[in-house]
Image (cartoon, rainbow, N blue to C red):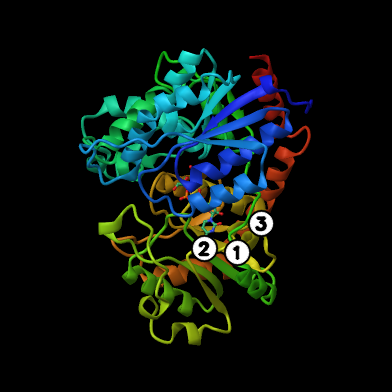
């Protein structure tokens, strides 16, 4: 493919606020730069703490001067937005940022705008600029299929997804999904965030194309269902689909070298890694249950612990965890020959790629899933928020890459269940089969992005269209 860039090949990539949404959008930017485009990334000023995002962005911008970041003017959310879900604030802040986005792009003449799904309101800006607007979907095709159906599901019942509970939702291409597995902010119909998700979903057919961070052979059934128009509401068009993944973060600048040195000393495939995304937090009670389960499992482990959530400081940065208070007395000493606890953050990609890691207990965030896929590591699925309950179902029932924790009683997963699932993954025949499947999918992922592979071909197609627009 041609790689000679010109100023006329400007694309604007518009990410949402959270780390999980930024990482793959940045990688998409780097990929498109290698195809001869120049990239501008407008960044909204979040009215709440977004964890390690600011630090991550500073690192990316220093290491990649070819990505041009533009901070948009801060906006003030309305005092009426009382939803407890940060997604409601995200939708509102992005909508209020449209004038700032428009003035940032007015003189730039970009070829196209590529937006995160939270940024669907920016379609109005693309219309004003008379340029095409593409969706970059940072989760998998299975979740996209479900999002395409939200307008249909919304109209088909007056009950909330919470009220529908374990009743199954039926969507082409994906396994039946219990209604209460919808993202938390979608469970109640009168929540501001619910409204945002419905509006966002209604606009999906209006995009000029949808770029998905997946590869077709990971989710073949659902990619076919979407492409053949079965997932959008009746009478609405399906935009062209480009599965160009897996795209994972290439830049790891968060430190955490000590845990890599510790992994160097462990036997091959012996360590289970527990890490729950950029936002995952457990109550103090749950942390103790995990500790007891891990200890009883007898397995080697590397465990990233964060401070428990503080309901009064939902959007604020929390202090480092106090392990003396959080862990059972003597736990660290008793497990010191086979376990390591890391506070707040570990270099996850490097950890997963390390030879000694044989299993991953994950919250099922899509970046974490793809990072495990690329490393060929089987998973224990422990969903916490966002679309992770759905990902758990897809990982276990469709992709066959994970076993799910069960027995969540609304408050706790008991130590026995933690012990059972970790032992199953690391010691049982079933766990070994899962590992073999993970290795096969890892190979499929590397074939997909290699020259001539399915994701490579989708990228060629996308680049051709973008250059022609
Ligand atoms: O100690 C840590 C914790 C996280 N990470 C990285 O942080 C990213 C986390 O991304 P992800 O696994 O996708 O989780 P979230 O940050 O929770 O991502 C949000 O965005 C994703 C993409 O849309 C969704 O799939 C998730 O459900 C949503 O919560 C990954 O690259 C991890 O490698 C680390 O490097 N070290």
The residue wearing badge 2 is 345
Residue 52 vs residue 209, the one in the foreground = 52
- Asked if residue 180 can be seen in this view, the reply is no
Q: Check disc 3: other Cα within 10 Å, few if <14, some if 14-19, many if 20+.
A: some
- 1 and 2 marks in contact (CB < 8 Å): yes
Q: Which corner quadrant of the image does residue 257 belong to?
A: bottom right
Residue 144 vs residue 218, the one in the foreground = 144
The residue wearing badge 3 is 436
Sequence-wise, the earlier of marks 1 and 3 is 1
Q: Is residue 319 left or right of residue 303?
A: left
Q: Residue at x 26, y 46 (%)?
A: 84
The residue wearing badge 1 is 255
Q: Check disc 1: other Cα within 10 Å, few if <14, some if 14-19, many if 20+.
A: few
Q: Please, is residue 351 above or below residue 299 in the view?
A: above
- Which mark lies nearer to you, 1 or 3? 1
Q: Residue at x 72, y 48 (%)?
A: 443
Q: Which corner quadrant of the image does residue 407 belong to?
A: bottom left
- Asked if residue 187 can be seen in this view, the reply is yes
Quadrant placement of the C terminus: top right
Q: Residue 76, percent across and down?
A: 31, 37
| Kind of element beneath mark 1 | loop
Sequence-wise, the earlier of marks 2 and 3 is 2
């Amino acid at each position: 493919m041609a790689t000679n860039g010109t100023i006329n090949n400007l694309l604007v990539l518009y990410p949402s606020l959270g780390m999980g949404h930024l990482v793959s959008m940045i990688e998409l930017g780097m990929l498109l730069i290698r195809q001869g485009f120049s990239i501008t990334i407008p960044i909204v000023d979040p009215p709440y703490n977004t964890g390690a995002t600011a630090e991550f962005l500073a690192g990316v911008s220093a290491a990649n001067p070819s990505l041009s970041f533009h901070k948009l003017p801060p906006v003030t959310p309305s005092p009426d937005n009382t939803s407890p879900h940060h997604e409601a604030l995200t939708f509102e802040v992005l909508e209020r940022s449209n004038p700032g986005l428009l003035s940032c792009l007015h003189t730039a003449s970009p070829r196209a705008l590529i937006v995160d799904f939270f940024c669907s309101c920016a379609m109005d800006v693309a219309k004003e600029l008379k340029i095409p607007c593409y969706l970059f979907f940072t989760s998998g095709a299975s979740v996209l299929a479900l999002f395409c159906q939200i307008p249909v599901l919304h109209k088909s019942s007056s009950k909330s997804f919470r009220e529908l509970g374990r009743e199954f939702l039926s969507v082409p291409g994906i396994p039946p999904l219990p209604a209460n597995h919808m993202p938390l902010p979608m469970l109640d119909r009168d929540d501001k965030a619910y409204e945002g998700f419905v509006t966002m979903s209604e606009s999906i057919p209006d995009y000029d194309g949808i770029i998905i961070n997946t590869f077709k052979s990971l989710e073949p059934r659902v990619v076919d269902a979407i492409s053949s128009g079965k997932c959008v509401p009746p009478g609405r068009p399906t935009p062209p689909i480009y599965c160009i993944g897996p795209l994972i973060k290439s830049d790891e600048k968060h430190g955490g070298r000590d845990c890599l040195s510790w992994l160097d000393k462990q036997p091959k495939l012996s360590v289970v890694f527990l890490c729950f995304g950029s936002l995952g937090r457990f109550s103090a009670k749950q942390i103790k249950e995990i500790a007891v389960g891990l200890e009883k499992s007898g397995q080697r482990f590397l465990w990233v612990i964060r401070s428990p959530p503080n309901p009064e400081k939902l959007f604020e940065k929390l202090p480092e965890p106090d392990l003396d208070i959080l862990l059972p007395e003597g736990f660290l000493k008793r497990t010191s020959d086979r376990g390591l606890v890391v506070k707040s953050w570990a270099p996850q990609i490097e950890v997963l790629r390390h030879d000694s890691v044989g299993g991953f207990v994950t919250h099922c965030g899509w970046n974490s899933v793809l990072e495990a896929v690329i490393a060929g590591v089987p998973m224990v699925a422990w969903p916490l928020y966002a679309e992770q309950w759905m990902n758990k179902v897809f990982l276990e029932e469709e992709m066959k890459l994970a076993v799910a924790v069960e027995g969540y009683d609304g408050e706790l997963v008991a130590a026995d269940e933690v012990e059972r699932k970790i032992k199953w993954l690391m010691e049982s025949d079933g766990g070994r089969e899962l590992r073999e499947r993970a290795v096969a999918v890892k190979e499929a992922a590397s074939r997909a992005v290699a020259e001539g592979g399915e994701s490579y071909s989708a990228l060629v197609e996308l680049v051709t269209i973008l250059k022609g627009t």
